[in-house]
Image (cartoon, grey):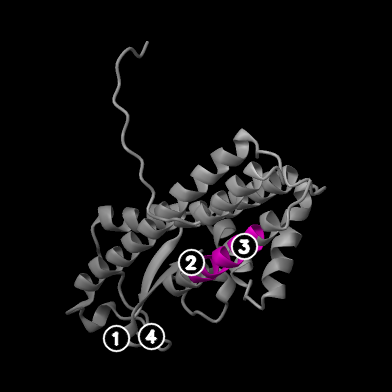
Amino acid sequence: MINKWVHIECIFHNKWGLKILNEINNAIKENRMEKPSEAFNDYSMSIAIRLDLISRLLQRITQHLGGLNEYLKDVNEEYIYTQEKEGFALFIVDELKLDILIDIDAFLFEVNSCCELLGLYMYELFIALGISIEKKQIGMIQAKILKDKKVDATWFRKLDGSRNFFIHNAAPYIAIDITDNKNQNLIIMKENLKTFTDPTKYITLTTLVEIREGFKNALPVFQDHLIDCVRSATK
């Protein structure tokens, strides 16, 4: 039985949703809406910490790429693959390889989880506002919000495909695209590819960045929409 413990301070750096909470508090004081459920508050906290986790994970993945670049500084020609010839696989320490795969998997999981939590968060807020809606409609509502504001939503499909890539396939292979030495790119493959003509068989660090940027750009749009909903609330 736990009789003594120490709580670790939790301060979240990402302030998404804070303006929504301020508007909610004003609406409750003015008796324009019901107080949201405890689940809503839990989702709000979960989203905050996951946004911090997502930022940290992308930082770590970028750092890992820096570690890989150390191996590529003076790489011999025999380790370089081209369309015309095969090379030898380059040895890197297991810790770096595993950290790369763990952090990419965690990044995709956290973005996916945050999207799901955001949907639940919106659902609970709509209920408090007296808006009749089914949970299964939230995804369509989110898509419409982005479409109305002309915000790109293709990152949703990239996230779904990339997440399924890790969940439903064997442990991936990794490589580094050195076509442009100034813009080297991490490649994560479903199989030991000899060519890269089929984009469904691999993802890149660029893909992860596009997912992160798409998600990042969508967040303020969702926030503004929810603030408008709260401001226009009437009982």
Q: Specify the label residue 182 is tagged with.
A: 1
Q: Specify the label residue 199 is tagged with.
A: none
Q: Specify the label residue 212 is tagged with.
A: 2
Asked whether 214 falls inside the magenta stretch, the response is: yes
Query: What amino acid does circle 1 point to?
Result: Lys
Asked whether 224 falls inside the magenta stretch, the response is: yes
Contact (Cβ within 8 Å) of mark 3 with mark 4: no
Please identify the quadrant where the C terminus is shown.
top right
Please identify the quadrant where the N terminus is shown.
top left
Front disc: 2 or 1:
2
Q: Earlier in the sequence, mark 3 or mark 4?
A: 4
Q: Which region of the structure is painted magenta?
A: 213-227
Q: Name the residue under label 3.
A: 222
Q: Specify the label residue 82 is tagged with.
A: 4
The Cα atoms of the two marked residues, 3 and 1, are separated by 36 Å
Q: Earlier in the sequence, mark 4 or mark 2?
A: 4
Contact (Cβ within 8 Å) of mark 1 with mark 4: no
Front disc: 2 or 3:
3
Camera-side residue of 172 and 96: 96
Label 2 environment density (alpha carbons within 10 Å; few <14, some 14–19, many ≥20): many
Q: Position of residue 112 (x, y in %)?
A: 56, 54
In the picture provided, is 213 more to the left or to the right than 58? right
Secondary structure of residue under mark 3? helix
Contact (Cβ within 8 Å) of mark 2 with mark 3: no
Q: Where is residue 107 in the image (x, y as percent from the top left)?
A: 45, 56
